[in-house]
């Protein structure tokens, strides 16, 4: 098998007659989704569970086995060791990379140095930390079954000596004005995956880049469009479409798959955002009715941003950020437990704080009843 030689960008010979019909549907659904995003007062808080879900599903494509509620439980101190803990650390790093990237893009465009920083965050203190985090590879690597030789590989990425050349061309393409931004996003993602610039973590970085690129192109008001649910559900076709580019130069097939993914996932994301917004509005009224507190909105935002938490952590946070007396918050939490808004996951014991959760939001994020 030969080393892969990336196609020059922008691409020639695309079947625009095939693709633009799909582009129209994808554009329309993405615009509807972004309209919802623009109507959310604090998307980082309200959509925090969806960000966690994206981190879970993108990491799952690479083999991790953890759920949204397990990630949240680990953050509250309930999972402290074992393989599950290692999986969750990878997921937490992915989410940290997403958050930090979002902040960076408010002032700066996507550049290769920025991507190296994302990679460093992604592989910090987890499996793969020995694979030069934050550095582009200088060795030849290949993809295939575990333990296979390069002769047995199913895909061999480009020569590392030419990697700077290919990456520079890819970076320049990000600033190019393609005929359609979604078509360009499809090409951007696939070309990055095929160049395979890192020893590990290429898939996750490539998927992080999808919402970031749409945001940079001003097609999203927030870099919060998550595609991994569709890609994980259609993992075999996802990989096959990428292989078909390297084996047959079938860019049309890949782009068509990607556009269908955008259309489907935009509808799914829109529905979930509507459900989260409806839950928030319902709880805004209910939490105030239950607590009769001037701090009810602070409380609501806190349980939306962290739907599993140690009660002591919330007490400290409210005291530190809002000056709320440490004896006030436990009473508010007790009222929410009695109203069945919050549920006890782990009762307090001695000096150990109780761990509480907001089941309706977690179940909504998971797409099924888990709590």
Image (tube, rainbow, N blue to C red):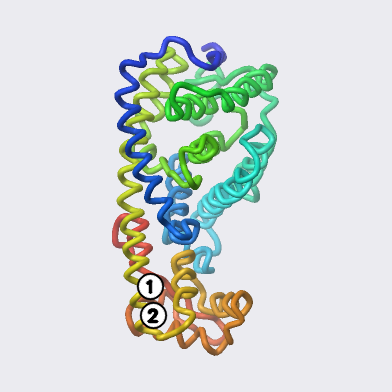
Judging depth in this view, the residue of 277 and 39 nearest the camera is 39
Disc number for residue 284: 1
Q: Position of residue 318 (x, y in %)?
A: 57, 77
Observer-nearest residue: 282 or 209?
A: 282
Residue 88's spot in the image, x, y percent? 51, 54
Instruction: Kindly tell me whether residue 99 is visible in this rendering.
Output: yes
- Residue 123: tell me if it is visible: no
Looking at the rendering, which quadrant does residue 216 occupy?
Answer: top right
- Callout 2 secondary element: helix
**Above or below: residue 77 compared with residue 195:** below
Q: Nearer the viewer, residue 240 or 226?
A: 226
The CA distance from mark 2 to mark 1 is: 6 Å
Q: Position of residue 227 (x, y in %)?
A: 41, 40
Question: What is the crowding at mark 1: few (fewer than 14 residues within 10 Å), some, or many (at least 20)?
Answer: some
Task: Give the side of residue 216 with respect to residue 27, left or right.
Answer: right
Count of numbered badges drawn on the protein: 2
**Based on the displayed image, in which of its 4 quarters is residue 157 positioned?**
top right
Which quadrant of the figure contains the C terminus? bottom left
Residue at the spot 33% in from the left edge and 82% down from the top edge:
339
Determine whether label 2 and label 1 are within 8 Å by CB.
yes
Q: Which mark is residue 310?
A: none
Tag 1's secondary structure?
helix
Q: Is residue 199 left or right of residue 40?
A: right
Residue drawn at point x = 40 percent, y = 55 percent: 39
Please rate how many residues cluster around mark 2, counting C-alpha atoms within 10 Å: few if below 14, some from 14 to 19, many from 20: some
| Residue 160 point in image, percent of width and height | 66, 21
- Identify the residue under disc 2: 288
Residue at 49% over, 83% down: 348
């Amino acid at each position: 098998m030969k080393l892969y030689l990336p196609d020059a960008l922008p691409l020639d010979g695309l079947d625009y007659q095939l693709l633009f019909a799909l582009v129209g549907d994808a554009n329309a659904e993405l615009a509807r989704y972004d309209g919802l995003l623009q109507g959310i007062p604090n998307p980082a808080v309200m959509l925090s569970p969806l960000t966690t879900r994206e981190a879970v599903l993108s990491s799952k494509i690479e083999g991790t086995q953890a759920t949204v509620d397990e990630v949240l439980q680990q953050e509250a101190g309930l999972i402290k060791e074992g393989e599950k803990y290692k999986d969750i650390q990878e997921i937490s790093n992915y989410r940290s990379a997403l958050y930090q990237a979002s902040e960076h893009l408010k002032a700066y465009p996507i550049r290769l140095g920025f991507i190296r920083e994302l990679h460093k965050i992604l592989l910090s203190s987890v499996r793969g930390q020995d694979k030069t985090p934050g550095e582009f590879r200088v060795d030849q690597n290949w993809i295939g079954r575990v333990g296979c030789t390069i002769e047995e590989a199913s895909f061999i990425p480009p020569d590392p000596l030419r990697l700077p050349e290919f990456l520079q061309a890819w970076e320049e393409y990000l600033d190019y004005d393609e005929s359609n931004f979604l078509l360009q996003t499809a090409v951007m993602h696939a070309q990055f995956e095929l160049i395979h610039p890192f020893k590990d973590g290429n898939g996750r970085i490539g998927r992080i880049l999808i919402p970031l690129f749409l945001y940079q192109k001003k097609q999203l008001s927030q870099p919060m469009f998550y595609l991994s649910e569709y890609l994980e559900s259609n993992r075999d076709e996802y990989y096959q479409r990428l292989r078909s580019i390297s084996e047959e130069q079938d860019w049309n097939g890949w782009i068509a798959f990607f556009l269908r993914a955008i259309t489907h996932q935009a509808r799914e994301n829109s529905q979930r955002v509507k459900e989260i917004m409806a839950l928030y509005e319902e709880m805004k009224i209910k939490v105030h009715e239950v607590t009769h507190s001037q701090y009810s909105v602070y409380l609501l935002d806190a349980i939306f941003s962290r739907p599993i938490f140690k009660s002591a952590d919330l007490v400290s946070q409210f005291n530190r950020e809002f000056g709320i007396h440490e004896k006030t918050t436990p009473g508010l939490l007790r009222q929410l437990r009695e109203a069945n808004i919050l549920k006890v996951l782990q009762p307090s014991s001695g000096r150990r704080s109780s761990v509480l959760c907001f089941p309706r939001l977690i179940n909504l994020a998971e797409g099924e009843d888990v709590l």
